[in-house]
Amino acid sequence: MREKFLAKDYVNNDYKDIVFNRRSYRRFDPSQNISRDEIVEMLDEATITPSACNLQAWHFVVVDNEEARNKVKAVTMPFNYPQLETAPVTIFILGDIHSHKVYREVWTKVYEEGRITKEKLDDIFNSFLPMYEKADRDFLIQDATLDSSMLAMQLLLVARAHGYEANPWAGYNSKDLVATLNLDNERFVPIMAISIGKPGEEPTESTRYDVNSKINFLA
Amino acid sequence: MREKFLAKDYVNNDYKDIVFNRRSYRRFDPSQNISRDEIVEMLDEATITPSACNLQAWHFVVVDNEEARNKVKAVTMPFNYPQLETAPVTIFILGDIHSHKVYREVWTKVYEEGRITKEKLDDIFNSFLPMYEKADRDFLIQDATLDSSMLAMQLLLVARAHGYEANPWAGYNSKDLVATLNLDNERFVPIMAISIGKPGEEPTESTRYDVNSKINFLA
């Protein structure tokens, strides 16, 4: 997959421009659509993000049409209507706390197809999988949250490489969101939403604290 | 701060190389040091990461000497000794669940210095701050975890822009880590560690699931 991405021509390939000129836009140009092909492409690129034990404990629900927008609007705080209403696409990132079950299924299938030996399969299953299979829900949520938040950051940059701007937000009713997205509440946990599109306003500037106030050196 | 970063010459400024050729290294070249100035510089760049309400709920503890490494080794799972022992620097990223208190202090000071009016100060304090001041610990941890994990992803890329490789890991005893880092357990929560240096081995390749298995479109 890396080769495929490396061979692409991005609208913007300038690292420092992508990272340091990124800002949070709250209004987009609703007339500028993004095709589903390009949405999938951006998510594909964002999944290059590392994850704990490569479990890839993330999932995406794409909201790119009026009906879907109205559904999620019902569980969104009004403060976030501007980006939800004006962005051609809003991607909800969920954590998948069953990712270790998927992992077991995937590798069992690889073994059943004769692509790895029984020994290799046992190796894979005995390294870290038991830890996840015995873990409590809080542990699984923590891991899925880390994976998915890292992916969210990557997606903000991917959007810029594609010539778009984005806004990450989490102002929704967490308790009702998963069901609204037609997903299983037992399996998926809300992480954040990312609205993507062409800018519809000037962004507000934000500042940062002096980094030295955030750093301790351990002696 | 953006202008400062945009004016810099990075070792690597090629977005797609930075993102898609990033891999997790578990062994580094211990003879290649990174100066504290450059560590601070990298953290400064990483804090361009967005955060909920710009609370910047992250904190860093830098481990770059033998004594510090031994201290954290005592709470690290043996599986992660290779990167801890060989990387010239390991940065522990913590979530700061008191970031809203810092925010109140910082803006009170700005007002006391006569840099904003009382009306502006009240505006700032009445927008979202009460929500955080009334929030329970779980809410604060969730927000700090999102902010800090996004920053972790950014830091992995910043490291590559500086010509280094990195490894994100969380295999430590979470319960004891914060005290080991000489921080307040009430205020800081462990997020992950990032070891940074010049590579000391070939990385192992990792694959990703077909992205289509991770995407639902909401109708």
Image: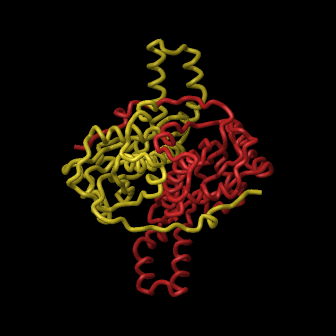
Chain colours: A red, B yellow
Q: Residue at x 68, y 61 (%)?
A: B216
Q: Residue at x 64, y 52 (%)?
A: A92
Q: Position of residue A143 (x, y in %)?
A: 48, 58
Q: Position of residue B30 (x, y in %)?
A: 22, 56
Note whether residue B176 is visible.
no
Q: How many numbered badges does the structure rendering display?
A: 0
Q: Residue at x 45, y 87 (%)?
A: A118
Q: Position of residue B87 (x, y in %)?
A: 27, 55
**Camera-nearest residue between B117 and A166:** A166
Question: Is A48 rendered above or below residue B159?
Answer: below
Q: Residue at x 70, y 43 (%)?
A: A87
The residue sitting at the right extreme is A67
Q: Position of residue A90 (x, y in %)?
A: 67, 48
Question: Is B197 rendered above or below residue B10?
Answer: below
Note whether residue A135 is visible.
yes
Q: Is residue A219 left or right of residue B209?
A: left
Q: Quadrant of residue A178?
A: bottom right
Question: Dividing the image into 4 quarters, which one contains the C terminus of chain A?
Answer: top left
**Camera-nearest residue between A156 and B95:** A156
